[in-house]
């Protein structure tokens, strides 16, 4: 039985979106990855999915390396195709051995970038103000740093997700896993002032999202990145800031100040402790640099 590629792809996308609850960004990337793979198969003269063999899998990965794709990108593309063929095996009894035998490339050993405490203090102080934009931006920055949530989690927050009596935010993470993250008095004060003085006056269309753009609409992930980079420029700090840097900073500062790894894992919403352990390398590097700069005989 010949399996129609596009129909099989559509069925797979519906499966990971509706049944597996994959994040929308993952669904989009997997769909792009599979279209890219279909183009490769076409160039190789393979029209039927039943004819895909281990040789094709190896040639495809070799092509990705030749194109100098990042290791993380190659790993994701392999995961996309493995999941797709696993689905085909389940639905159509298609042999999925070709890609299951592939190894993921080793991750590049790059430590997460984060802000030192004095850098973050400068970023906050240089962006303070009583105008609408400053109050909104400071509340956004305070909440990202106080909770370590992802940018997608931030833009999904509704007003009801923030409990200002207990100073806890309800977060819907990857795979629609719910968690509750506390925040401190700095974030509390910034959010209260933002809601009272900014959000309500800006609203010109009804919606429940916590953060709004300057037209009162829902703030997007791209909007958050733009805001953070404008704040970086205002603080006259060099480089580029991205929302995940604040997540890295949150985790690193907690560990530097004595928090245990399991607690940080739970706060970040990591399903595996190994994902959180990267921050122990960051803190060790921080300790080493501090020692080398401070010890007279280092």
Image (cartoon, grey):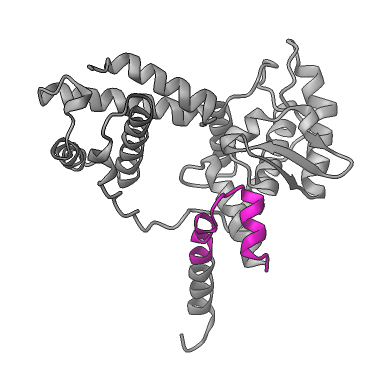
Left or right for 58, reference 73: left
Q: Please state the extent of the stretch shown in magenta in the rendering.
A: 258-282
The magenta stretch spans residue 261: yes
Q: Is residue 14 magenta?
A: no
In which image quadrant can residue 137 be found?
Answer: top right
Depth check, front residue: 194 or 249: 249
Q: Position of residue 220 (x, y in %)?
A: 58, 25
Q: Residue furthest top?
A: 205
Q: Residue at x 80, y 29 (%)?
A: 160
Residue closer to the observer: 149 or 177: 177
Q: Is 96 situated left or right of 53 in this image?
A: right
Assign the magenta stretch its main secondary structure. helix
- Position of residue 145 relative to residue 170, above or below, is below
Horizontal arrangement in the rendering, residue 265 relative to residue 207 (left or right): left
Q: Position of residue 280 (x, y in %)?
A: 53, 65
Identity of the residue drawn at 63% across and 29% down: 155
| Residue 190 vs residue 70, the one in the foreground | 70
Q: Is residue 190 left or right of residue 211?
A: right
Please indicate, yes or no, whether residue 85 appears anywhere in the rendered image.
Answer: yes
Quarter holding the N terminus is top left
Residue 74 or residue 16, whichever sits in front: 16
Q: Position of residue 292 (x, y in %)?
A: 48, 78
């Amino acid at each position: 039985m010949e399996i129609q590629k596009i129909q099989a792809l559509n069925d797979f996308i519906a499966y990971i979106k509706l049944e597996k609850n994959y994040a929308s960004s993952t669904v989009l990337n997997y769909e792009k990855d599979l279209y890219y793979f279909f183009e490769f198969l076409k160039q190789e003269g393979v029209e039927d999915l039943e004819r895909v063999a281990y040789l094709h899998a190896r040639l495809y990965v070799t092509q990705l390396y030749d194109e100098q794709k990042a290791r993380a990108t190659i790993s994701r593309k392999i995961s996309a195709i493995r999941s797709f063929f696993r689905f085909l095996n389940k639905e159509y009894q298609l042999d999925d051995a070709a890609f299951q035998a592939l190894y993921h490339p080793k991750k590049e050993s790059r430590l997460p970038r984060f802000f030192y405490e004095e850098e973050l203090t400068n970023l906050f102080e240089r962006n303070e103000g009583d105008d609408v934009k400053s109050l909104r931006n400071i509340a956004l920055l305070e909440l990202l740093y106080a909770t370590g949530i992802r940018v997608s989690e931030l833009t999904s927050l509704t007003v009801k997700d923030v409990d200002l009596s207990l100073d806890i935010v309800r977060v819907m993470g990857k795979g629609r896993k719910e968690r509750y993250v506390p925040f401190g008095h700095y974030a509390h004060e910034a959010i209260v002032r933002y809601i009272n003085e900014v959000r309500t006056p800006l609203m010109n269309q009804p919606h429940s999202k916590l953060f709004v753009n300057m037209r009162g609409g829902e703030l997007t992930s791209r909007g958050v990145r733009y805001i953070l980079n404008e704040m970086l420029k205002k603080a006259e700090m060099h480089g580029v800031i991205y929302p995940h840097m604040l997540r890295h900073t949150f985790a690193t500062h907690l560990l530097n100040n004595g928090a245990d790894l399991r607690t940080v894992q739970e706060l970040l919403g990591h399903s595996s402790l190994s994902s959180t352990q990267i921050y122990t390398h960051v803190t060790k590097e921080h300790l080493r640099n501090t020692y080398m700069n401070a010890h007279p005989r280092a």
